[in-house]
Image (tube, rainbow, N blue to C red):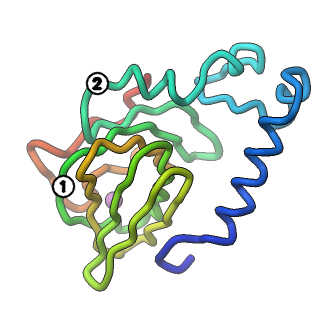
Amino acid sequence: MTVGVLIDRLEEFRKGVLKYREMSEEDQGLPFNGSVGMGSSPSTALRETLCQQFALIDEHWRPKVVAELNGQEVKLVKFKGEFPWHHHDTEDEMFLVHRGTMQVEFRTHTVTLGDGQFCVVPRGVEHRTLATEEAEVLIFEPAATRNTGNVEDETFTAPNGVRM
Ligand code: NI
């Protein structure tokens, strides 16, 4: 996967979301039920929106696990300010913005992401995340990935596996 925003995939994703919103509640249940809750049934998932989940988070830079699949975790996190430079030796990580604007800064360039945009940071590539105003972000990465990667930071290194 190359560094950067995958605009074509994003467009496909957006069309999917629009189509999903036009579906009846019954049809929305399967096969994609919009679930963000751990082990939610479709009927529960319809009441648990991402907005509601993010509203429960009252701290910055502390990811909360909301789903697990195939050894990966989906985490919700609020960003505000500057995160330390780091890399992950063995994990690619994906950032998907739910609401707000964030930057993924690399040593060579910076990627700006708004609502619905995402970026995959390949393993081994040094990066940091920034947000001037608070941003709500989903992270997809293997379970037990340390948020600060190779860096141990007193303020920013978050405990792993913390659920909503
Ligand atoms: Ni990282």
Q: Is residue 137 left or right of residue 133?
A: right
| Residue at the image point whose x is 20% and y is 55% from the top | 83
Say few, some or many: other residues with alpha carbon within 10 Å of mark 1 (under 14 / 14 to 19 / 20 or more).
some
- Mark toward the start of the polypeptide (1 vs 2): 2
**Camera-side residue of 90 and 109:** 109
**Quarter of the image that includes the N terminus:** bottom right
| Residue at the image point whose x is 71% and y is 20% from the top | 46
Q: Determine whether the beta carbon of the residue marked 1 sits less than 8 angstroms from the nearest atom of ligand 1.
A: no
| Location of residue 91 (image quadrant) | bottom left
Q: Is residue 26 left or right of residue 77?
A: right
Q: How many marks?
A: 2
Q: Position of residue 18 (x, y in %)?
A: 76, 45
Q: Is residue 141 visible?
A: no
Element at label 1 = strand
In the depicted structure, whether residue 107 falls above or below residue 70:
below
Element at label 2 = loop
Distance (Cα) linking label 1 and label 2: 17 Å
**Camera-side residue of 44 and 91:** 44
In the depicted structure, whether residue 149 falls above or below residue 74:
below
Label 2 sits on residue: 58
Q: Position of residue 75 (x, y in %)?
A: 46, 39
Ligand 1 is in which quadrant of the figure? bottom left
Residue type at numbered disc 1: Glu
Q: Position of residue 13 (x, y in %)?
A: 71, 55
Q: Position of residue 59 (x, y in %)?
A: 25, 30
Q: Is residue 62 visible?
A: yes
Q: Are marks 1 and 2 in contact (CB under 8 Å)?
A: no
Residue type at numbered disc 2: Asp
Label 1 sits on residue: 82
Q: Is residue 153 left or right of residue 71?
A: left
**Quarter of the image that includes the C terminus:** top left
In the depicted structure, whether residue 133 falls above or below residue 87:
above
